[in-house]
Amino acid sequence: MKVIKTIAPNKPGARKFLKLYGDNLIAVRYRKAAGRRLITIEILVDEYSAPQDSGGPRVNHQENREPVGFHLNFDQHQLRAQAKALGARWSQHQKLWYLPRHQVVALGLVNNIVAGAAERCVDVDLLLNDAGEPSYE
């Protein structure tokens, strides 16, 4: 099923589900599959303490973890492979790749970031998971 749009709980189109599920509502997704339009919801069903961090670099600032859209030229094969290895996702509508900002910076592609692209993206799910990374579907 292809995600057409993802809506935050407090936005129009999700408010009736917010009344049903309250603070447990994470997102509402509009999907398309084989001649059908579907509405799915993501809800929180359990919560527990996270295990201790195993180390590695920390990304403390929320803006560094936010997904950003960036472009790569067709002939940048090595950078494309590196981005894919990091979990980059392709937006067919916008013709852009998506990764968290800190990963785009680490790849040296700051100048390739398209400002405001993530807010306009409707075909790739860009919600952040608990680790602060985008959870793509």
Image (cartoon, grey):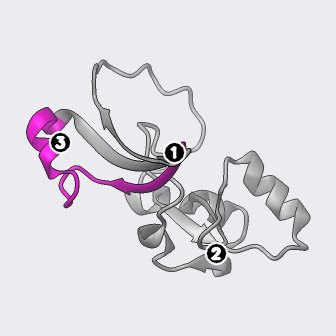
Q: What element carries label 3?
A: helix
**Res 26 → quadrant:** top left
* Residue kind at label 2, given as amino acid type: Val
Q: How far apart in space, not on screen, are marks 2 and 1 (Cα)?
A: 19 Å
Give the residue pinned by disc 1. 58
The vertical placement of 92 against 31, above or below, is below
Residue at the spot x=70%, y=72% of the render?
A: 109
Seen from this angle, which residue lies furthest left? 19
Q: Is mark 2 on a helix, strand or loop?
A: helix
**Residue stretch rendered in magenta on the structure:** 1-23
Seen from this angle, which residue lies furthest front? 35
Residue 12 belongs to the span the image colors magenta: yes
Residue 13 belongs to the span the image colors magenta: yes
* In the foreground, 133 or 17: 17
Q: How crowded is mark 2: few (under 14 residues within 10 Å), some or many (20 or more)?
A: some
- Circle 1/circle 3 CB separation < 8 Å: no
* Residue kind at label 1, given as amino acid type: Arg
Give the residue pinned by disc 3. 17
Q: How crowded is mark 1: few (under 14 residues within 10 Å), some or many (20 or more)?
A: few
